[in-house]
Amino acid sequence: MATPAQTPVAAVRLPLRPDLAGLTPYGAPQLDVPVLLNVNENPYPPSEAVVADITAAVADAARGLNRYPDRDFPRLRSELAEYLQVESGVSLAPEQVWAANGSNEVMLHLLQAFGGPGRTVLSFAPTYSMYPEYARDTLTGWVAGRREPDFTVDVDHAREQIAAHRPAVILLASPNNPTGTALPLQTVEAICAAAATGGPAAEDGAATAAVVVVDEAYGEFRRAGTPSALALLDRHPHLAVARTMSKAFGMAGLRLGYLAAAPALVDHLRVVRLPYHLSALTQAAALAALSHRDELMAQVASLRAERDALVTWLREHGLRVADSDANFVLFGVFDDRRAVWDGLLARGVLIREVGPEGWLRVSVGTPAETAAFRAALEEVLCW
């Protein structure tokens, strides 16, 4: 009996969305070199005590893997709220906290809930390069206003952009990636005020608020006297403040991001999240890591000091350096930044070629890694 002719595999054409044609996946270079200072990781691995507690917690959770995890993970939300109160002095209820697989998924939930076709997300460039991809993936329009020469956001310009575009979501990275710039609370508050009636019109024509998202992925590294936008939550129900365990906690491999907002805003995110999106193993590991927060956060002070010393050193050598409240430093300006990047790589140091033309970004590493970066840069620039 003859079998039906099959179409050759090479002839099959997949119905890819037209706007995705020719695009490549996001990602920083992953190269095997001695000094990795390109993706803003915490350079200190967890201690054996932390590893042991995470291992025990995951093993215990594994005994129940035949059951689905808790969809709304109240214990984890409660522990995250308690941590934020200690870290920022802001009291939050567990119902004000939401978590997902990295702050990337948190941002995706926000745009799934509030963005979409016919809507716009507004940010201010230069900023995190994933933001326009979140917009693209949720079929949300992307608009980038400008930052000032010192990488701050001008309030009048922000008001103009809000009035012109009526965005559904406004993304404010603070500290900003790749510049390290933190926004003053007065700037965030002014944008929240403009956004309160600055969103897209509702179906009945009534004004809505644009959701203002302050992305504080690097918030724990902010300098003394730089407050968190968490302090504004009680006055702005359309404000959300995002955090992550990837940076200060040194848990990039855990993939746990979270945000704080009004309970009503959080409830909208629960609608769009996939069922059981946060695995039982992730929840267990995150809870175990949070129980060691004092030990893990103790590294933050040393990383801040290392950052400030690096900023001073670069400036003493005549380079421009953006003020940084993060665990990385943006420096320049070079006529051929690729040549500098290549020269460092040839000497075993990987940093990031990102940001405005002529600038480079280096993550803060251990003292030994920072010393290796300095030595390599001295050779490349013939100091």
Image (cartoon, helix red, strand yellow):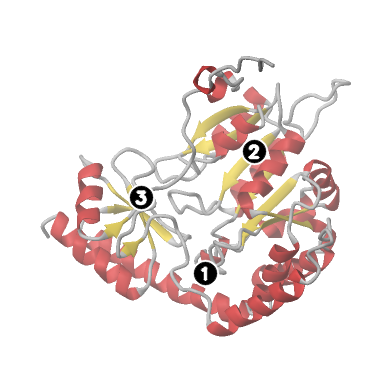
Q: Is mark 1 on a helix, strand or loop?
A: loop
Q: Residue 170 carries which label?
A: 2
Rate crowding at label 1 as few (under 14), some (14 to 19) or many (20 or more) other CA atoms within 10 Å: few
Question: With 265 as the anchor, is 14 left or right in this view?
Answer: left
Q: Mark 3 points at which residue?
A: 352
Where in the figure is residue 308, as x and y percent of width and height? Answer: 38, 67
Where in the figure is residue 247, as x and y percent of width and height? Answer: 53, 63
**Which residue type does callout 2 highlight?**
Ile
Q: Which numbered mark, 3 or 1, is in the foreground of this view? A: 3
Which residue does the image show at 66% across and 17% down from the upper left?
3
Quadrant of the frame with the N terminus: top right
Instruction: Pick whichever of labels 2 and 3 is earlier in the sequence.
Output: 2
Q: Do the residues labelled 2 and 1 touch (CB within 8 Å)?
A: no
Which residue does the image show at 31% across and 68% down from the upper left?
370
Q: Which numbered mark, 2 or 1, is in the foreground of this view? A: 2
Q: Which mark is residue 224?
A: 1
Q: Which of 154 and 276 is in front in this view?
A: 276
Q: What element carries label 2?
A: strand
Which residue does the image show at 65% across and 41% down from the upper left?
191
Quadrant of the rendered structure where residue 89 is? Answer: bottom right
**Which residue type does callout 3 highlight?**
Arg
Q: Which of 171 and 108 is in front in this view?
A: 108
